[in-house]
Image (cartoon, helix red, strand yellow):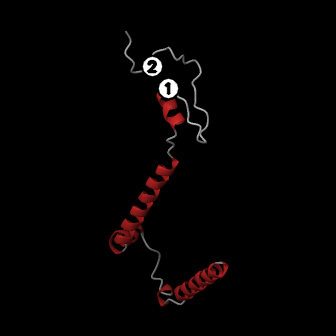
Amino acid sequence: MRALGIFSRFGVFVLVLVILTETMEFSGWTESPGAPTSSSFAIAMLDDWSMMTLVLGLLLSMAMIGASYLVRDERLANLTWDLGQDVETPVVGMPPAATREGLNRNSPMIGDDEE
């Protein structure tokens, strides 16, 4: 297993070296007709690179959706805290249930029918 890790690190290092040398030897880098204008940049992004811009936008939106999914907190104590109720939290490694100061168990809650 250790040899496989060392081999993969060496392979990634060689791959990066090959990509760098191929990029540096590209003959298109020497041609510099002038500084690009904002309109030429916009045309390049929307015409020449339109598919890559679309793929990048999809990847970024998937990353933001995934981050919001990972951040949410659905523990019973926190859900009932938002509703203003007191509940007993299960003993399965959960923190004690949240209680609100000043709320009485006999006082009516929002949505309860008062008679």
* 95 with respect to 72 (left or right): right
| In the image, farthest residue toward the left | 47
- Does residue 9 lie above or below 57 as drawn? below
Q: CB under 8 Å between callouts 1 and 2?
A: yes
**Which corner quadrant of the image does residue 20 belong to?**
bottom right
Percent x, y of residue 105:
52, 17
- Does residue 98 lie above or below 16 as drawn? above
- Residue closer to the observer: 88 or 114: 88
* 77 with respect to 55 (left or right): right
* 26 with respect to 94 (left or right): left
Percent x, y of residue 36:
44, 73
> Mark 2 — residue?
109
Viewport quadrant of the N terminus = bottom right
**Residue at left offset 50%, top offset 89%:** 26
Percent x, y of residue 80:
49, 31
Q: Secondary structure at mark 1?
A: loop
| In the image, farthest residue toward the front | 91
Q: Earlier in the sequence, mark 1 or mark 2?
A: 1
**Residue at left offset 48%, top offset 83%:** 32
Percent x, y of residue 23:
52, 85
Q: Secondary structure at mark 2?
A: loop
Structural crowding at the residue carrying mark 1, measured as other residues with C-alpha within 10 Å and reported as few (<14), some (14–19) or many (≥20): some
- What's the CA distance linking mark 1 and mark 2? 8 Å
| In the image, farthest residue toward the top | 115
- Does residue 48 lie above or below 99 as drawn? below
- Residue closer to the observer: 94 or 35: 94
> Mark 1 — residue?
85
The amino acid beneath tag 1 is Gln
**Residue at left offset 46%, top offset 79%:** 34
Residue 73's label in the rendered image is none
